[in-house]
Amino acid sequence: MARTIIPFGPQHPVLPEPLHLKLVLEDEIVQEALPAVGYVHRGLEKLTEIRDFNQMVQIVERVCGICSMIHAQCYCQGLEEMLGITAPPRARYLRTIWSELHRMHSHLLWLGLFADGMGFESQFMQCWKIRERIMDVNEATTGNRVIVSVNVVGGVRRDLNDGQLRWIGSILDQVEAELKALKKPLIDDYTVKKRTVGKGVLTAEQVYELGAAGPTLRASGVAQDMRMTRYAAFDELVFTPVVETEGDCHARLKVRYRELLASIDIVRAAMRALPEGELAVAVKDKPAGEIVTRVEQPRGELLYYLKASGKKNLDRVRIRTPTFANIPPLLAMLPGVELADVPVVVLSIDPCISCTER
Amino acid sequence: MLKDFIRSSRAKSPWIIHFDCGSCNGCDIETLACLTPLYDVERFGIVNVGNPKHADVLLVTGTVNHRNKHVLKNLYDQMPSPKAVVAIGACGLTGGVFREAYNVLGGVDKVLPVDVYVPGCPPKPEAIIDGVVLALKKFAEKQQAAG
């Protein structure tokens, strides 16, 4: 059988974003996948030459709309370390609460898209219905549904009062009950298992060598989570990474599902332990030096490299996002997969092309 | 008679296609949220399709750059006329916060004739639905003009 090349993307019904893969097929089996990126490249890192370091917070938030809060958190943490200041304890806890809420809405979004990718549309609707509760919390506490813009260099801009904390607690109870009800029709379902078990398998050695990050890494049995580096409030909160060992699409589904429940517990614990005090410290100096800072994004490890020389503009901002790290594992997963399973395998790494290309 | 039926159906139950040009995903997930139970645009007969040849309204989010402008133009050309274009979000309007970045050409109207502009960063799903409804009026006008 001659080889055929089938283009996948840039505009494809299961992809909300333009990613282009050339799939080299023999019969229905993928032999090789060749990626082509660049459809979303904007050149954000260079904007640091015209925006000062405070304005860059708003730019890095828009690297990715799904995990905007976490990008800004990483950037601000790096600059705070460079400036030699620490955000007040209340700010660190509030950052943790908002970042975990972001992780929850991102994972729910992904659960829905993944279900849609295998043609399970009613589950897509269910997941997005649950997600709207988290979006309500974002809107009520920060003023915007998606790009919440709560971080500033030195702390946070907004506070949560007792009434809001109680209300968030009641929303989390609802979300938890609804998520537990999802387990049977989504995780344990016969058809879902048929579509996901044994698809796109990577062993622990393979993912480690290919440099995967986040749930893609943890689904193959490597317990690596940047929250173990104890940034923000994680130095005081109990945290254990969620690990599965099978390394297939179903394991990635289970990791994200269990992380959702883990995030609910983290938010609850952070709300219980929320200390009183200031929201932000004043920034007086200009940053100087070099720094690498890492946080855990919904998709994996996010790394910022910042370089400054005492001016109001930074010299260099380099962002390494988890999807960039997860593309080589994806290309290793695809050979041997049937064409009909390609959307499921591609979605299983939770691709965020906007992050990757910036 | 069939022609009249198709004509009224296209304006009463428009099929939309969504293309992410160079957006940060904020507008994309809000556009997708319009399809889900809380907002549920399907009650207006609006269906999201993946094939441009089936679509009446094109929703574009994000900035245009040198690479994706060909994809965008290609999608638009494949849609049957009359057709309407909705630009969503600050980036789709002017380039937004990225307007000074080196790989950004600007808003969608640099490449396509845009009928409705939906501002916001990102706009709320209500605003996007409103934009689509406005686009439908323009769509009906275009149908009239085409006869």
Image (cartoon, coloured by chain):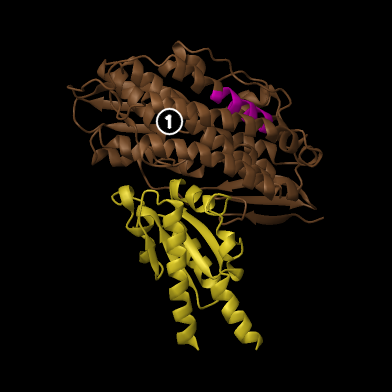
Instruction: Give percent across and percent down for residue B17.
Output: 55, 62
Q: Magenta-highlighted stretch: main secondary structure?
A: helix
Q: Residue A154's image quarter?
A: top left
Q: Residue B62's image quarter?
A: bottom left
B41 or B99: which is nearer to us? B41
Chain colored brown:
A
- Taking the magenta stretch, the answer to whether it contains residue A260 is yes
- Taking the magenta stretch, the answer to whether it contains residue B135 is no
- In the displayed structure image, the side of residue B17 where residue A1 appears, left or right: right
Instruction: Give percent across and percent down for residue B50.
Output: 61, 60
Q: Residue B67's image quarter?
A: bottom left
Find the magenta span and give its range.
A253-264
**Dot 1, how many residues are within 10 Å of its Cα: few (below 14), some (14-19), or many (20+)?**
many
Mark 1 — residue? A70
Give the colour in which the image draws chain B. yellow
The quadrant the C terminus of chain A occupies is top left
Q: Residue at x 53, y 12 (%)?
A: A238
Instruction: Give percent across and percent down for residue A145.
Output: 42, 42
